[in-house]
Image (cartoon, rainbow, N blue to C red):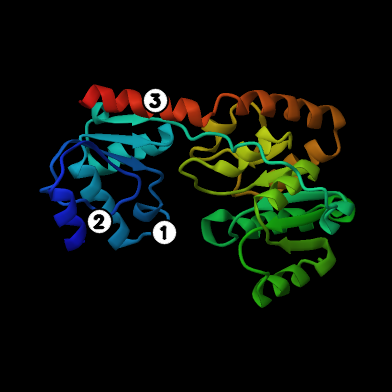
Amino acid sequence: MALFSRRMAAKSFDIAHHTYYWPLPDTLPVRARVTTIHDMIDDTIVPNRRKSSLKQRSVRQADHVICVSEHTRKALVERYDITPEKTSVIHLGKPAPTTASSKTHEENTTPYILYVGERGGYKNFRRLVLAYASSPRINRDFQLVCFGGKPFSSEERNAFATQGLALKQLRQISGDDVTLHDLYRSASLFVYPSLYEGFGLPPLEAMSLGTPVACSDSTSIPEVVGGAGEYFDPTRTDSIAQALESVLYSATRRQELINLGRKRAERFSWDRCAQETLAIYRTLV
């Protein structure tokens, strides 16, 4: 940090934009400071005193704060007691097109429900498994494929067995973006049971790639998915199972969600994100 400070002090800047919470020196010669807040997880859901402290300092230093969702902005304003006029919402963009691989993945040979991301805590994977296990026809007709995160732990495998599920019914896959996009495109349904998200990129990825979405009706997720998802109460396994069944066993509903999802995803672009960010820079300088 000392070396960084000496080098930066020799220059002057119009804008210093924090895209994470590491504080810039107070003596940095800059006309305006901007910071981006992605979520309030460290302050609420999974408390982390150090990250929360860094975030608060970054917000205090900033002349303007960009939030990636209205839900995050409201939580920030309420918790940090800052004026709403100091904040703006700029949504993230959908993923750039990725060419599908020519390889046929073994995981794609049977119908499956796709889950993406880590599986612990507020991600609510445990309740998804309970919902999956509670519906005999779903766990008979569809695998539950998990992309990302670590391989299933012994604790998870024991939990599957306790619910009467065979290991062949659940699969964990790791890979690159091409692998993930292949999985999206071939999935019968994408499911997102998270209890909290500051934005939630996976549902946007799924919609943009023509995968129907079933998701939580909580926090920022409806702000991203809009009317293009089959919603459920993430705290109730029966609600999750009902939402899955209503899409998996209705070709009409599935196609409706695919069409709505593609249209919804068009509202989120990185070009738009960049232009809205540039507009904020211009108001500050």
- Residue found 68% across the figure and 70% down from its top: 152
Residue 179 vertical placement versus 267 (above, below): below
Residue 32 point in image, percent of width and height: 19, 34
Task: Kindly report the distance in space between the C-alpha atoms of the residues bearing marks 3 and 1.
Answer: 30 Å
Residue 200 point in image, percent of width and height: 54, 42
Whether residues under marks 2 and 3 lie with C-beta atoms below 8 angstroms apart, the answer is no
Task: Give the SS element for disc 1.
Answer: loop
Residue 163 vertical placement versus 64 (above, below): below
Task: Give the SS element for disc 2.
Answer: helix
> In the image, what residue type sits under mark 2?
Ser
Q: Earlier in the sequence, mark 3 or mark 1?
A: 1
Nearer to us of marks 2 and 3 is: 3
> In the image, what residue type sits under mark 1?
Val
Say whether residue 153 is left or right of residue 105. left
Q: Identify residue for label 2.
A: 53
- Residue found 74% across the figure and 25% down from its top: 259
Front position in the image: 273 or 246: 273
